[in-house]
Image (cartoon, coloured by chain):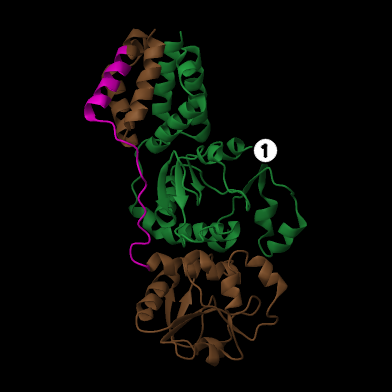
Chain colours: A green, B brown
Amino acid sequence: MKTMGLDKLYLVNPRSFPDKEAERRAAGAWEILHAAVVCTSLDEALCGTSLAAAVTARPRDLSHEVFDARQGAREVLGYARGGPVALVFGNETAGLTTAEASKCQIFVNIPANPEYSSLNLASAVQVMVYELRMALPDVSSFSPQPGLAATFDDIELLYRHLERLAISSGFLNLKEPKRFEQRMRRLFARARLEKEEVNMLRGILSALEK
Amino acid sequence: MKTMGLDKLYLVNPRSFPDKEAERRAAGAWEILHAAVVCTSLDEALCGTSLAAAVTARPRDLSHEVFDARQGAREVLGYARGGPVALVFGNETAGLTTAEASKCQIFVNIPANPEYSSLNLASAVQVMVYELRMALPDVSSFSPQPGLAATFDDIELLYRHLERLAISSGFLNLKEPKRFEQRMRRLFARARLEKEEVNMLRGILSALEK
């Protein structure tokens, strides 16, 4: 991270932190490690972000919009002008779960040898932060959507609201609930919701609730 | 190397080879390690190459041509059509000596944070082999497989449905109706709705209507 000029590290339920091995490996970049924010959930880590990108090798059933590392870096950097953004990595052994990945608005895939496509975590991080750095000059020509992006927590509240109404209205008795949530997450992730749109959607949901 | 599809590894005077630690770290890529060619000099390793690129962080006095990682990968790949080419890396602690670097035709520099520019060896190799792969034509193009798109009339029916409920629920008494419709159109246009998503949204609207 530091080699490419990034310094905000969030760790979700690290197995061990602070950690001697991490200290040893972070030679010269201790200030980033020491300032790492330890969270107990991915939701906590993503709170306030306007775009979260899941870096994932596995293809998923319910695919969000997928970018390669280069396009993804540009996309993330474009949004960074409007608010905090996040690259989300899974752990070394299991990667991101489907539930974790679906909390993100976009998926980023690092092009690799199809016969041996799984980069280790450090390599995946290095490639992504390198692409972020390389994308810096390009960003001036990037035009993100004009509205103010909704934050992660705005959007999570919308999902809760939708789910509550889907259940209270009886809709979710007929359908599989997990599938409903996944579909809605996928749809609204593609749309990259704006603050005002979330307000409007929640407004109509509240009116219908009465 | 294997993640990006490369398989020819030359080691010049390795401190220890074969090596247990290397075996452990090369999980799944042992064939590359086992086929590594051990040389006693850089000259021996570079014998027969038509282009050798020294990957180096330090600026050198020597007036070799310097490329960044992306341009360098293209340059190397261009020459690869005419014969073997080599990326030359120094060891973890000292990097390449000036004498070693000057045996190469070009220098490649990985853009980095000027205040902390030294990538470790594994990271530098990962970035370079990634750039080589990205420089292959067609490799970077990645197209997701979308679901069956909703038709114009599916979507228009959704807007009618939404509007009807927005009025019947009283939501649209409080807001300007035209603006509401415009916002919803804009949101769902960005999302590029699929048939199944429209069905789901209309399903929940119907349930709420009752």
**Residue type marked 1:** Thr
Q: Which residues are magenta?
A: B136-164
Q: Which of the 4 image quadrants contains residue B18? A: bottom right
Q: Against B152, is B173 above or below?
A: above
Question: Which residue is at the front of the view, B85 or A204?
Answer: B85
Horizontal side of B10 relative to B23 (left or right) equals: left
**Pick the front one: B84 or A81:** B84
**Picture coordinates of residue A150 (x, y %)?**
45, 33
Residue A53, percent from left and from top: 48, 46
Task: Please tell me whether residue A57 belongs to the stretch shown in magenta.
Answer: no
Q: Is residue A47 left or right of residue A158?
A: right
Residue at x 53%, y 92% (from the top left corner): B43
Q: Secondary structure at mark 1?
A: loop
Residue B35: % across, % down: 57, 78
Quadrant including the C terminus of chain B: top left
List the residue tagged with mark 1: A40
